[in-house]
Structures are given as C-alpha cells and as structure tokens.
Image: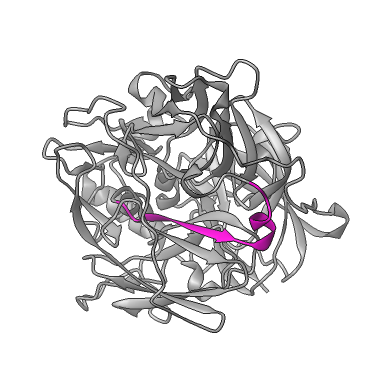
Amino acid sequence: MILTRRQALKLAGALSGSSFADLACTEARPRPRLLPSWLAIPEPFKVELPLPKLLKPMRSEGTVDYYEMTARPATVELIPGVQTSIWAYEGMLPGPTIEARSGRTISLRLRNSLPVPIVNHLHGGRTESLSDGYPTDFVLPDSGEAFDGGNPQRSVSGEREYRYDNRQRAAQLWYHDHRMDFSGPQVWRGLIGLYIIRDEEEDRLPLPRGEKEVPLVICDRSFNADGSLAYPSINPTLRDSPGVTHSYMGGVLGDVILVNGAPWPGLSVANTRYRFRVLNASNARRYELALDPAPARSASFLQIGSDGGLLGSPVRRRTIRIAPAERFDLIVDFSAYPPGTAVTLRNLADSGRAGSILRFHVDRKEKDASMIPERLSSFEPIDTRDVVTTREFDFRFDRSSHIWTINGRPFDERRIDAAPRLDSTEIWRLRSDFNHPLHLHLAHFQVLAHGGPPGLWDAGWKDTIDMEPGQATTIAMRFSGYRGKYVFHCHNLEHEDMAMMANMEVV
C-alpha cells in the first residue's frame, strides 16, 4: 500500500519518539533552526572560488542534444583537508552545468546509482509533465531494489530520459532532487546543479562574457566531527520514515556558507564589470547581499535578470534579498575600486560568519569591452484583462496536525487543487503565516502586489516568490506549453517535505 504524505508523516513522528504536539504547544509555528557543526569551522577567504564544470553532450542529431549523467555517491573535499561523503550528479557539488539553446531540445538520460530513489526537477523549466519531476515519478536505484511511495505507472528502474524542449527565453535555471518527502535531505547531500538557457536576444547584448560571467551557487551546510554532512533526518538512511526531528520542522540552517561548493571562497577580479548569476540553493536560509565597502558613487549591484530571464531594463540595487530557489542576474562594476582593494560580499540577514559569503580581490587593471544597455529585453507585462479566474491560497502551519499546509490541507497526490486551462491567464492571491518562498512548476508569473506594491526584488518573470509573515501577495501567470499534472509548493524544503505542497492540473 502507498501511504499518503500525511500518513507517512504521522508514522515518522511515531517512529522517532518525538512529540510534534510538544512543539506546537510552545510555539505557534516552528522557526528555522541552526544546526551546529561539530567540525572546526575553517577561516573564511582562504580558498579560491571553484567554477562548476560544463557537461558536454554525448551527441547531437538535428535539433536534439543528447546528454548522460549519473547521480552517485562521492567523496570530496568541501572543507580544506577534510573528506566528506556526498550524493551528487557526476560526483560533484554542485553538479555539472548544462548549457542549452532556446528552441533546441535536450534529452538527458539520468542514471541513479544511489541507494534510494531520486526525482529530477528542472526548476524554472517549462517542461512536459512526464519530465517535470513530479515527486512520485521515481527513478529507482540501478541495484533493482524496490521502494514504496512511488507512482508504479510513472516510476522507472535504473535510469530515466528527461526531455527539455527549452521553448523559453534565456534564463538561469537549476536542477535538483524532488523525491517525495525527502527533497530536503537529498538536496542537502548535494543533488543540485545549474542549467543555463541562452538565446539570440541575449547574445546580441554586450554583457560581460567568458571568465567575467560567473555563477555563484550559495548554500549553507553543517558538518559532523568526522567530516560528514550533518542533517537531522528521522532516518539518516533516507530509505523510509521521512521528515526531520521535531526541533527542525521550521527549516534547517547550516553554519558553513558554501559558494560553488567551497567555504567562504575568494575570487580575484579585474577593475571591470562582472556578471554574477546568483542562486540561493539553501534549504531554508535567506540572504541579503551587500558589498563591503559599497562603491562611493554608484549602486552596488545592477540587476539585469531574475528567475525567468532578462528584465526589460536594468535596476540599480543597494542590496539583494534572495530566498531559497530564487535567482538574480547581477552586474558588479569593480572600476569603482582601485587595484589592491578587498571587497566582501556580505549577508546582512545574519551576523558572525554567516554574515559573510565571498571576498573579491581587485588585483589588476584591464580594458572593459562590456556595456549594459538601458534596454535589455522585449519584456511585456501580463494584461490583467485576459484573466479568466482568481484563486486564493493560504500557507500556514496547522497546530492540530502539526504540519505545514496549503488552504488547511496537507499534500495529497490524488487531489487536484487547481485546474487551469491551457494558455489561460489567472490571478492567484496568496496569504502566509510565515516566510514561505512559493515555487510554481511550469508557470512563470509577474508580481502585482507584495505586502503593498511590488518591491524592486519582484521585477521580471518569476517562478519563486518569498512571502513574509502576514503578507498578502498577488501574482498573475499564464499556463502555456503543456497539459498535465504539476505541483506548487513552499521551497523551504523542510516545509515542502512536511506537506506544504499542492497539485495543479493544466487541462
């Protein structure tokens, strides 16, 4: 018998010997909690920023590029001098970057050499349902071992072909594990990677390129004394009994900040413009990015893109607030600093070591051939006169069931919570009792209201929006591309694993 998510969570609580009720009696909603490392935390800015490797296609035929990738255990050096076991695509954290062209299809054959099921989700992709990474569409281990909880009609053993048509504009997407009830620990162990779509519109722009286009995959992790990754799973094997120990139901925070898999790294830069493609790949941690020292006569950042690609025009920003799963495409002009300057990328949302992320060393002069045009893209706002339906969703912690819910109900894969029509436009009104970064599969949206008028951080096409406690948020979206069953959920991964997810079926 396949357990529903709610049944599994109740079973998990019983098996752990923990009482979720004890927590609920003392706190209306559990908050994210720091998981301390037992390993000596390294000094910051002692290692160089690594760059994710590029995955090359095995072959190309017509308009299709064929890739192969394996999710497998690996031992890597995240902390200098310390060996850490991870689960990762091609044994790397982050996994290899896939570069796609808009309009060209990618066939990705993903093999599972891990001891548990995986599900691959292309976050931000407009993808057919069978390749989207629905949480129960398991890729079972290549050992042939069976697991409960998957959809027997849509699960496969050993490997699966995912097809991504890339019928969308240039943007920085990312891929990650999306296994039912276990996204949090499996992403924490390393199952993340970048997926960048390029197109002719972006190619024509004189933006920084080559070594001056730098991905920054930011995440936090904690470590045990033996160098292994610490995480408060009820069952550390991740074979069954989903969930975290009750103290961490609000989200898990690590005390080591990794950028591209390195703790607090440094990057040598010239006194020119750089393009930084930033992803928050943390389970629950938010960041507010700032430069220290800030440039004297200009904004710290020039935002040129968001989750769904380029903005219509650049936006000058002093700081960048980024929630889990959000992406920001940023220009930093280091000509504001003389050679010899050290510039630290700070996190104003925290203090101590969690208040620092990366250090830039301006160490040379170079001629800058890049420019940032005032007009970036043919960006069109959604016409609200096309709206056919308005829906309302309430995201909150249920004290009676002690789980995270949408409209008072935990996730049930058999229930359809919204059935938008293909190519229709809808408005969704959202309410939140806490910080919940909402992510929609398939549909991109524009922000109409966010606790008042949209903020600077809401510009452009989005697939993730950070809702704050008590905020009323309104978004408008088009359901284009494909029919089928998809999910939307909180991207605090502990909230997602604890039932804050719902179904939509595009009809």
User: Can you say whether 195 is above or below 434 in the image?
Assistant: below
Residue 278 at least partly seen: no
Q: Is residue 202 magenta?
A: yes
Residue at the outermost bottom position: 61
In this rendering, would 468 be left or right of 267? right
Q: Which residue is drawn at 27% across and 29% down?
A: 46
Q: Which residue is drawn at 48% across and 22% down?
A: 348
Question: Which of these two is toward me, 60 or 70?
Answer: 60
Quadrant of residue 129 in the image?
bottom right
User: Can you say whether 405 is above or below 68 in the image?
Assistant: above
Q: Please give the count of numbered marks on the rendered protein.
A: 0
Q: Residue at x 36, y 44 (%)?
A: 260
Quadrant of residue 254 in the image?
top left
Q: Give the range drawn in magenta.
A: 190-206
Q: How is the image coloured?
A: one colour
In this rendering, would 131 be left or right of 159? right
Q: Is residue 151 magenta?
A: no
Question: Which of these two is toward me, 134 or 101?
Answer: 101
Residue 501 at least partly seen: yes
Q: Which image quadrant: the N terminus? A: bottom left
In this rendering, would 112 be left or right of 448? left
Q: Which image quadrant: the C terminus? A: bottom right
